[in-house]
Image (cartoon, rainbow, N blue to C red):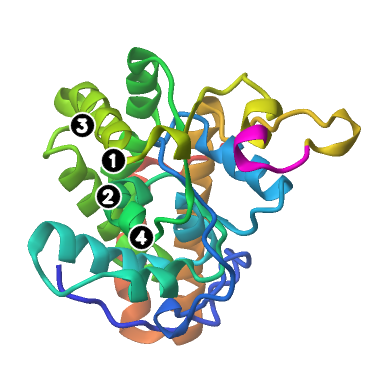
Amino acid sequence: MASQPYTPKPVTDVFTPGDTDINRRECRRVVPMRVLALGLGRTGTASLRTALKELGFDDCYHMMSASVENPPDCLMWSDALAAKYDGQGTFGREQWDQLFGHCQAICDWPCVAFAKELIEAYPEAKVLLTTRDVDSWHASTMKTVHWRATEPELRLAAKFDWAASMYQPMLSKFWTSFWDGDFEKNGKRKFKEYYDEIRALVPPENLLEYKMGEGWQPLCDFLEVPLPEGGKKFPRTNDTDGFVDRCRKRNRMQMLNVLFRATVVGGSFAAIVFGATMSYRRFFGWRGRA
């Protein structure tokens, strides 16, 4: 996987106005790294991210940081994946500080692919390990992230859209490499091996295993922070039911960006995009659900 150069966000990407455009390769650490939340995705990591931010660990990195918040992050993730799995280049503390320099905590994938490296890079950070029943986790992941990593709509958008062109190759590389080429077959085995590895790497006094539903108390005790005031409920976000619809909506918005850019630019590019759009509609349908 060759290193992909940074390119600015097109001014015509008006249908995804929330996407920021920060080149992390030019960034440095500005806050300390305090928490490594290394539970696999679909174990409550989105809810945990919200909870950690509520407790003052701001920002907390999550896959959404790269997929929908600041897509150029995917360029550095691709560099990290190439270094780990293909032996291309190096990726160490300096690069992690560029990517995570604004964060006091990290969680979710693709961070988990680098658990050992992150534990070594930030030995002072406490380690959280969200977990759940392996069978329910596998079923949830099959319907959500595995679907997203393999869906053809995203592959089509990646041929033309600025953000998708960075996100889709990174996600595909991570998903294929981390699960030894086959999530459906290897997922449960890798789940068990991964959790055993983290338990072996982290001293018990620096590790908290946590399941959603346990509330604020064990989290706050471990992190040595006060409970939220006013009896605030523990957050619950990123449920399975809404995942696919949210992803399909983003696909549509990205294709609208492409169409708008074609309208502005005109000429042969417009003809190419028109053909791609017709293919999109013919093979996948123009889904009207948000």
Q: Residue most toward the left?
A: 87
Q: Residue 78, located in which quarter of the rendered image? A: bottom left
Q: Earlier in the sequence, mark 4 or mark 3?
A: 4
Mark-to-mark CA distance, 2 and 1:
7 Å
Q: Earlier in the sequence, mark 2 or mark 4?
A: 2
The residue beneath circle 2 is 116
* Residue at the image point whose x is 62% and y is 67% from the top: 17
Question: Does the magenta-highlighted stretch encompass residue 185?
Answer: no
Q: In the image, 107: left or right of 94?
A: right
Percent of width and height locating residue 88: 11, 71
Question: Which labelled disc corresponds to residue 201?
Answer: 1
* Badge 2: residue crowd in 10 Å (few <14, some 14–19, many ≥20): some
The residue beneath circle 3 is 183
Mark-to-mark CA distance, 2 and 3:
21 Å
Mark-to-mark CA distance, 4 and 3:
19 Å
Q: Which residues are magenta?
A: 221-226
Amino acid type of the residue that numbered disc 4 sits on in the rendered structure: Tyr
Tell me whether the residue at label 2 lies in contact with that at label 3, contact meaning CB atoms closer than 8 angstroms: no
* Badge 3: residue crowd in 10 Å (few <14, some 14–19, many ≥20): some
The residue beneath circle 4 is 167
Q: In the image, 187: left or right of 125?
A: left
* Residue at the image point whose x is 65% and y is 58% from the top: 58
Q: Is residue 288 above or below residue 262?
A: above
Q: Earlier in the sequence, mark 4 or mark 1?
A: 4
Q: For the residue labelled by badge 2, is the local secondary structure a helix, a strand or a loop? A: helix
Q: Earlier in the sequence, mark 2 or mark 1?
A: 2
Mark nearest the camera among 1 and 3 is 1
Mark nearest the camera among 4 and 3 is 3
Q: Earlier in the sequence, mark 2 or mark 3?
A: 2
Q: For the residue labelled by badge 1, is the local secondary structure a helix, a strand or a loop? A: helix
* Residue at the image point whose x is 39% and y is 83% from the top: 7
